[in-house]
Image: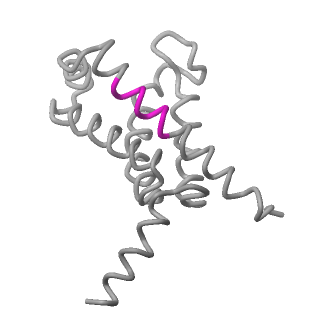
Amino acid sequence: MIDNRTAPYAALLLRVSLGVMFLVHSIYLKLVVYTLPGTVKFFESLGLPSASAHLTIAVEVIGATMLILGVRTRYAAAALLPVLLGASWVHWKNGWLFTNAGGGWEYPVFLAVATIVQALVGDGAFALGRRAAPAIEGRMRLA
């Protein structure tokens, strides 16, 4: 049974932790550690077009920000899922454990499942999207 008193806080914790993880992973790892040119070369080495590196970073940063703020959480999680499925594909050949050489698929698959859960549970507590929605609906009725 779901405890309706604490469930919104569980969704908040999941939402913010996923958002922070995506933001740090994208900005720090892909732009600072590997640099943008290095990330592009990595994507190209996988046979992916260079634009896919830029698109991945953009989706991660925008989706992460939306998650942290609680704006259109379900859409943000859904948009981030292909990124995680792609990461799972990249790491699949390395085996299950993420500590394997090149990193295994356990971490990206776990994050994909957590992202699906976020899409299912929605915003949670303290979501800005909940505050904006009534204001927008009120303006639309007046128009």
Relative to residue 113, is residue 88 depicted above or below?
above
Please identify the quarter of the rendering in which residue 62 is found.
top left
Please identify the quarter of the rendering in which residue 14 is found.
top right
Quadrant containing the C terminus is bottom left
Residue 6 image position (x, y, % from top left): 76, 56
User: As rendered, which of 81 and 18 lies closer to the eye?
Assistant: 18
Relative to residue 140, is residue 109 depicted above or below?
above
User: As rendered, which of 112 and 27 lies closer to the eye?
Assistant: 27
Please identify the quarter of the rendering in which residue 54 is found.
top left
Q: How is the image coloured?
A: one colour
Q: Is residue 41 left or right of residue 103?
A: left
Q: Main secondary structure of the magenta part?
A: helix
Residue 10 image position (x, y, % from top left): 68, 50
Q: Is residue 34 left or right of residue 1?
A: left
What residue is drawn where x is 67% and y is 58%?
8
User: As rendered, which of 133 and 122 lies closer to the eye?
Assistant: 133
Q: Examine the structure image and report whether residue 23 is included in the region drawn in magenta.
A: yes
Residue furthest right as drawn:
1
Q: Is residue 16 left or right of residue 59?
A: right
User: As rendered, which of 20 and 143 lies closer to the eye?
Assistant: 143
Quadrant containing the N terminus is bottom right
What residue is drawn where x is 31% and y is 90%?
142
What residue is drawn where x is 30% and y is 15%?
32
Magenta segment:
19-27
Residue 121 image position (x, y, % from top left): 60, 60
Residue 72 image position (x, y, % from top left): 42, 60
What residue is drawn where x is 54% and y is 58%?
123
